[in-house]
């Protein structure tokens, strides 16, 4: 796809509007211009909200079967265009083409397909009321209405899919605000939704600055729910801003996830898993295993194996299939990584290893995969999210100590455990404050399994049945089956005499 000359804008009521503030996007892979995007103004954001609002009633009364069918068609179209999507995602984010081709895009397709074909979600169910045998209840899972979906820059296509597919399935209409750095694949998805047959206004996308457009979404009385993925600080602000209009808010936030390695692990597998856990997407994943908790008895051997494997990883242009290391998606993030690592070193951490990045394009944004040792849980690099290719290494001696260090973080998104002792894995996993715990694995995910955070990592879940139910509110129909005795018993509370 020739994106350099492609012009994007807000996608409102099934039309791409080339108006607003013009912005030129450069690729973090090599600094070249990749597209022009017109960012939405607050007035355009309001028009997008109106379009979602006006189409909501009709969409929610569209049969569930039909909503599933349209999602299925969208999955087919994204699959047909998967090479274009992968290249666009790589050029916009700097992630390797290997990753976008074999992970981000296929998962996006599979996950849209999951929501089009899963059968656990029903829009209603019958209940009995044990107190009133002459009645029956119907619980309806009504859509929330208009959903404002706010998406980060690290995995833009998949994160957009995780919001739009369950929300549309449940009968909501959406205004999606992608990150100003990486709006391209969300806009392509919106264009493809028209080809799939989604009605006008059901899916709107407004690229642009977070604070300005975000506050238009959070303050609008026409938006009933905000589904946010991003940093914990922004999540707090969104929660505050949503309070005045009593919106439902779901938050998928940051993490500082521990990868706990015991001395009875399968060492080869654990070394690969720990590297995969932190260096996939150059550590720019919310659930990256950014703290290695290693049992002291194997520390030397394990770290030297990490260095060995790391030294063989290939830097280069992420658009080449041989390249194994992703770029950093934007300059602000690169500066933040540099600042945090320098601060860590000042507070006593040691740069145990930093990868030579020779071969990466000079105009791009790169940070060498780095191992930081002598980190303690109180250092900033031991407790705060760096969101880059930096592994903070800490040691423990006992199982109890590992659990204490793991849970000492304010975050609770994910964790990994590496041990051949199944009973120990289950025992430790059940005490970890984390929404996902991988046992002898890392990063694998399933559309059927809900994911989300404990503590400062968020509220609510995405994916699975739980993820669909987040986009619903229950309506209870209390139905009298025609038994007037019941009425009399109830009304007798205020009418003591004869009628
Ligand atoms: P961010 O919080 O800076 O931005 C996220 C989105 O919010 C962007 O679209 C941004 O424009 C918008 N935004 C910014 N200020 C806003 C405001 N005041 N009101 C409304 N919207 C606003 O996050 P980021 O830097 O884009 O992404 C990285 C962060 O996202 C990391 O902390 C990472 O851990 C987190 N993340 C979490 C998950 C998860 O599932 N838990 C997944 C991916 C990323």
Image: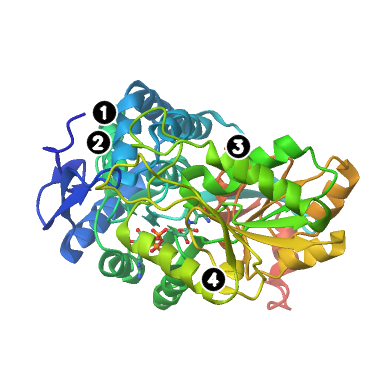
* Residue found at the far top of this picture: 80
Q: CA distance from mark 3 to mark 2?
A: 26 Å
Mark nearer the N terminus (3 vs 1): 1
Q: Is residue 283 left or right of residue 55?
A: right
The residue labelled by disc 1 is: 195
3 vs 2, front mark: 3
Element carrying mark 4: helix
Report if the beta carbon of the residue with label 3 is closer than 8 angstroms to ligand 1.
Answer: no
- How packed mark 2 is, by other alpha carbons closer than 10 Å (few <14, some 14-19, many 20 or more), is some
In the picture, the disc for residue 173 is: none
Q: CA distance from mark 3 to mark 4?
A: 35 Å
In the picture, the disc for residue 446 is: 3
Q: Position of residue 40 (x, y in %)?
A: 18, 58
Mark nearer the N terminus (2 vs 4): 2
The residue labelled by disc 4 is: 344
Element carrying mark 3: loop
Q: Nearer the viewer, residue 380 or 482?
A: 380
Mark 2 and mark 1 in contact (Cβ < 8 Å)? yes
Mark 4 and mark 3 in contact (Cβ < 8 Å)? no
Instruction: Give above or below for 12 relative to 458.
Output: above
Q: CA distance from mark 4 to mark 1?
A: 50 Å
The residue labelled by disc 2 is: 191
Q: CA distance from mark 3 to mark 1?
A: 27 Å
Element carrying mark 2: helix
Q: Quadrant of ligand 1?
A: bottom left
Mark 1 and mark 3 in contact (Cβ < 8 Å)? no
3 vs 4, front mark: 4
Instruction: Give above or below for 147 relative to 341.
Output: above
Residue 57 seen in the current view: yes
Quadrant of res 77: top left
Q: CA distance from mark 1 to mark 2?
A: 7 Å
3 vs 1, front mark: 3
């Amino acid at each position: 796809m020739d994106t350099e000359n492609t012009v994007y804008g807000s996608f409102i009521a099934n039309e791409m509007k080339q108006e607003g503030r013009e912005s030129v996007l450069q690729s973090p892979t090599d600094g070249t211009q990749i597209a022009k995007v017109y960012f939405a103004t607050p007035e355009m954001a309001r028009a997008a909200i109106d379009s979602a609002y006006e189409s909501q009633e009709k969409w929610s009364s569209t049969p569930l079967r039909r909503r599933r069918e349209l999602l299925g068609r969208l999955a087919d179209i994204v699959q047909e265009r998967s090479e274009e999507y992968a290249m666009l995602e790589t050029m916009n984010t700097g992630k390797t083409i290997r990753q976008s081709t074999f992970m981000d895009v296929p998962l996006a397709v599979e996950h849209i397909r999951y929501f089009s074909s899963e059968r656990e979600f029903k829009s209603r169910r019958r209940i009995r009321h044990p107190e009133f045998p002459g009645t029956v209840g119907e619980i309806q899972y009504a859509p929330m209405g208009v959903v404002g979906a706010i998406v980060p820059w690290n995995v833009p296509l998949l994160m957009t899919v995780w919001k739009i597919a369950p929300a549309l399935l449940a009968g909501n209409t959406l205004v999606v605000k992608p990150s100003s750095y990486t709006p391209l694949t969300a806009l392509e998805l919106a264009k493809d939704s028209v080809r799939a047959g989604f009605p006008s206004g059901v899916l709107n996308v407004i690229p642009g600055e977070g604070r300005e457009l975000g506050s238009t979404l959070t303050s609008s009385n026409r938006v009933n729910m905000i589904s946010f993925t991003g940093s914990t600080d922004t999540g707090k602000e969104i929660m505050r801003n949503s309070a005045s209009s009593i919106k439902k808010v779901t938050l998928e936030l940051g993490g500082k996830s521990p990868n706990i390695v015991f001395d009875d692990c399968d060492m080869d597998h654990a070394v690969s898993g720990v590297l995969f856990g932190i260096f996939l997407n150059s550590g720019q994943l919310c659930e990256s295993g950014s703290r290695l908790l290693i049992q002291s008895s194997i520390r030397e051997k394990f770290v030297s194996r990490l260095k060995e494997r790391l030294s063989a990883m290939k830097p280069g242009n992420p658009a080449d299939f041989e390249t194994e290391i992703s770029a950093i998606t934007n300059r602000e993030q690169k500066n933040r990584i540099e600042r945090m690592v320098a601060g860590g070193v000042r507070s006593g951490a040691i740069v145990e290893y930093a990868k030579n990045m020779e071969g990466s394009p000079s105009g791009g944004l790169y940070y060498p995969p780095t191992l930081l040792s002598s980190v303690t849980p109180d250092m900033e690099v031991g407790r705060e999210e760096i969101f880059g290719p930096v592994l903070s290494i800490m040691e423990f001696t006992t199982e109890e100590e590992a659990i204490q260090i793991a849970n000492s973080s304010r975050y609770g998104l994910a964790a990994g455990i590496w041990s051949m002792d199944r009973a120990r894995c289950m025992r430790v996993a059940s005490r970890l404050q984390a929404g996902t715990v991988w046992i002898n694995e890392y990063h694998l995910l399933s559309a059927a399994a809900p994911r989300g955070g404990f503590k400062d990592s968020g509220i609510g879940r995405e994916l699975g049945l739980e993820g669909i139910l987040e986009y619903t509110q229950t309506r209870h129909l209390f139905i009298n089956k025609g038994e007037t005795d019941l009425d009399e018993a109830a009304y007798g509370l205020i009418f003591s005499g004869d009628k």
